[in-house]
Image: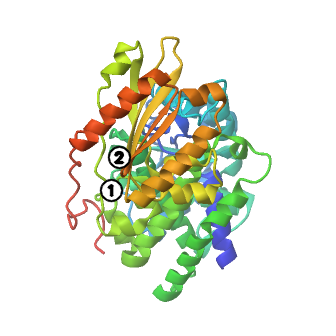
Amino acid sequence: MIPRFGWCLALACLGACGAPSRRTALAPPTTTTAAVPVAVAVPAPIPEPEDPIRGSRPPTPAEARTLARLVRYAARIRGLQFTGPVTIRIADSAAVTQNLDERLDEEDFAEKRALYTALGLLAPDLDLRETLSGVMNEQVVGYYDSGHARLVLRDDAVPASAQGGSGAAGDGAAPENGRMVVVHELVHALQDQVLGLRALHRAPRSIDESNAVEALVEGDATLAMVRGEFPAGTDAEVEARALEHVRESIPGILQRSTRGDTRLSGAPPILREPLLSAYGDGFAFCAKLYIRRGWEGVNRAYTELPTSSEEILHPELYLRGARTVPLELPTFPDLKAAGLTLGTEETLGELESGIYFAMALPRPKAQQAAAGWDGDRVRVVFRPDGTPGAVWLTRWDTDGDAVEATNAARAVMRALPPQERADAAVVRLDRHVFMLRGVPAALHAGLTEAIRQGIASSAVTRAAPETTTRGAPLPGAPPP
């Protein structure tokens, strides 16, 4: 049983979906289309939705019968009921990739590219769109589009009874890979109909907040997929031990999943790691909630959302209600006076801070250095020639954590070419660490003083956003 769970998780990481949000310009997004009513085995026609998927088709009768069985199966293992039909369409790999590519938000795409280039996380000459298209073409087997409430499946993974295979508990008659991808995507449809997935994707969020929400969404679907492989009647103690085993196995599973010559393994870590984290760390997070409170614990997370990747990576912080107080950067008049233009402002969080530190440190050491994260805010600045730089303030849990982060950041700085190193700085201010990249050295002292004064006056700390009251009712969810 246990090895099979690990295989399920690897499949989820490499062959499922993404989900559009403010940050998905740099990660494979999600979309949907086709007609499978919940109440009957063979779907009745449903009008073609607006914005049809070019090059797609409806399921064949054989595919539709299998998909209808999987609709019922997904609802049963996830413990939620569909409130309406699921629209599904079938498309070949090229059509899937093209439609996902066309849904990239160009403005958001340009902003994230400038940010990650400024921090050295993307090479300036990288063809980012081609890289993303290659990863999507290789990895995306199915995707759910909450914006249009439809599911798209790649034709080489579509379950059909004619293809053979068997589904869990007699449900589905598809090859194992196709069946599991469909189940994963159908859980996203359940999230949309019952738990408000569309509203989650429409809300503006920072990169860190988006990473946290995507980890909840993808971790939930992956947990359901894995949980569906348990024999009926598995007792709670055996179930908890099995899920803990999978959770502890995640790092090794993900490492094996990205070995070899693939577009995903060759993608820059800032593209690859958040995507894998959504499935792996998201599964671990949701498994922790499930072991404690069953599906009701996972359901409630949609009304009491995790607000940072820190809470995903350390579920105990989420469970005890810890929240990070956001940071705010000064206006930096010295930058404007020097002819630099201010660009987008973001929060990267513990996950992406660790990816940054890993540019100079082994991954485990980089993750350890990022583990004391307690907030950050980064702003892109542009020189007159358009070259992006960055001004990045971070806060850490303790002085010791700040020292560790300072050492990690300085290791990254030392690895820079001499000219870039001259325009970079790392300054520790008690529990805060201030980093500069691509900013003329003549401005460093003035910018650091502005941050020092902001810390002293608490001007860099803004009021924490209101959070959902714990124990609030969950609209549309079944009773525990």
Q: Is residue 422 above or below residue 471?
A: above
Mark 1 or 2, closer to the camera: 1
Residue 412: x and y in percent read 59, 42
Residue at image location 57% in from the left, 48% down from the top:
357
**Quadrant placement of the N terminus:** bottom right
Residue 134: x and y in percent read 69, 35
**Quadrant placement of the C terminus:** bottom left
Cα separation between marks 1 and 2: 10 Å
Q: Mark 2 and mark 1 in contact (Cβ < 8 Å)?
A: yes
Comparing 388 with 396, the one in front is 396
The amino acid type found where label 2 is placed reads Leu
- Which type of secondary structure does the marked residue at label 1 adopt? loop
Residue 227: x and y in percent read 53, 72
Q: Is residue 62 left or right of residue 369?
A: right
Residue 80 seen in render = yes
Tell me the number on the disc at residue 458. none
Q: Residue furthest right?
A: 261
**Which of the two labelled residues, at mark 1 and mark 2, occupies the earlier sequence position?**
2
The residue tagged 2 is: 200
Residue at image location 25% in from the left, 62% down from the top:
474
Instruction: Report which quarter residue 286 is drawn in.
Output: bottom left
Comparing 367 with 418, the one in front is 418
The amino acid type found where label 1 is placed reads Leu
Q: Is residue 254 left or right of residue 40?
A: right
Comparing 225 with 107, the one in front is 107
Instruction: Report which quarter residue 191 is drawn in.
Output: bottom left
The residue tagged 1 is: 305
